Image: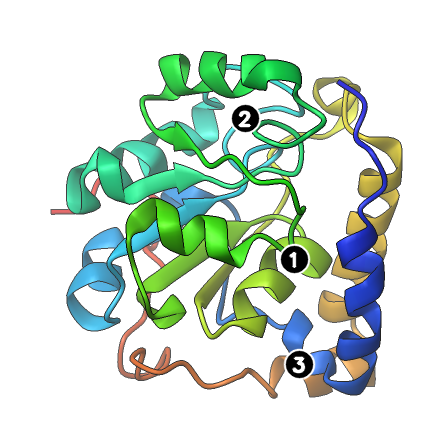
């Protein structure tokens, strides 16, 4: 699948320049299996979890769960119920996915819905709220590997945002969208690199309506093991 130009991300750049804290996730993890879904539900006011797909749950354009993400997806479904966990992708479920063929295949393979949406992240809020029948975006958790799309999307609307590192590298990542791959590297180095700008931004996380903060409610498990 070839992704079309993400005009929404380009248009949102002006907002990011004015408010660079939109790029800063509430929580940063290696992968989705390190997220404490029980705490997310019980202590953060979250009712549903939205995952990015490529390099968050699967290899780029893959149809099977990645081994490093398998435990996390199962935990999310166990804690929230499969109906309250879904994928919001900028490939599957969009106009780049004719007749939503890839979305259907992913739903069958992963056991969760792929939200259909015409506007790519950081657009598409109405479709997400409508899918879960939720009125308050603060009751959603957005999990993804892209700062400029996934994290900005969540932060723009007050969601709890969780950033993960890309699942794949080297040959395993050979199918990744080249533009996305370059931008992801720039984004991550800009935020997490050892320079004053990144360190400054990491201390400027946006407040979340319900989550009391990492000191009172840490959401990262130590090793990604199954949660009770």
The spot of residue 137 in percent (x, y) is 39, 67
The spot of residue 47 in percent (x, y) is 24, 58
Label 2 vs 3, first from the N-terminus: 3
Q: CA distance from mark 3 to mark 1?
A: 15 Å
- Is residue 119 toward the left or the right of residue 125 in the image? right
Q: Report the residue marked by disc 2.
A: 58
Q: CA distance from mark 2 to mark 3?
A: 28 Å
Q: Report the residue marked by disc 3.
A: 21
Provide the secondary structure element on which disc 3 rests. helix
- Is residue 106 toward the left or the right of residue 146 in the image? left
In-front residue for pair 92/187: 92
Residue 225 visible in image = no
Between disc 1 and disc 2, the foreground one is 1
Q: Which residue is located at x 72 percent, y 84 percent?
A: 19
Q: Report the residue marked by disc 1.
A: 122
Q: Which residue is located at x 36 percent, y 61 percent?
A: 140
Count residues near mark 3 (Cα–Cα under 10 Å), then give few for <14, some for 14-19, many for 20+. Answer: some
Residue 65 quadrant: top left
Q: CA distance from mark 1 to mark 2?
A: 20 Å
Q: Quadrant of the N terminus?
A: top right
* Residues marked 2 and 3 touching at CB (< 8 Å): no
Between disc 3 and disc 1, the foreground one is 1
């Amino acid at each position: 699948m070839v992704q079309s130009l993400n005009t929404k991300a380009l248009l949102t750049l002006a907002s990011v320049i004015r408010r660079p804290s939109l790029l800063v996730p509430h929580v940063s993890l290696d992968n989705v299996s390190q997220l404490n879904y029980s705490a997310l539900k019980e202590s953060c006011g979250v009712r549903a979890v939205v995952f990015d797909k490529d390099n968050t749950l699967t290899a780029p354009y893959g149809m099977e769960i990645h081994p490093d993400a398998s435990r996390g997806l199962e935990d999310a479904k166990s804690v929230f119920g499969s109906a309250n966990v879904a994928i919001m992708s900028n490939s599957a479920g969009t106009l780049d996915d004719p007749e939503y063929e890839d979305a259907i295949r992913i739903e069958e393979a992963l056991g969760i819905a792929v939200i259909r949406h015409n506007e790519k992240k950081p657009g598409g809020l109405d479709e997400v709220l409508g899918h879960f029948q939720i009125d308050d975006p603060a009751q959603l958790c957005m999990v993804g590997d892209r700062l400029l799309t996934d994290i900005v999307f969540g932060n723009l609307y007050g969601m709890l945002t969780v950033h993960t590192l890309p699942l794949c590298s080297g040959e395993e990542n050979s199918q990744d969208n080249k533009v996305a791959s370059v931008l992801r590297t720039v984004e991550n180095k800009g935020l997490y690199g050892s320079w004053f700008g990144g360190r400054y931004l990491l201390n400027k996380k946006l407040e979340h309506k319900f989550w009391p903060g990492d000191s009172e409610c840490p959401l990262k498990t130590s090793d990604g093991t199954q949660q009770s």
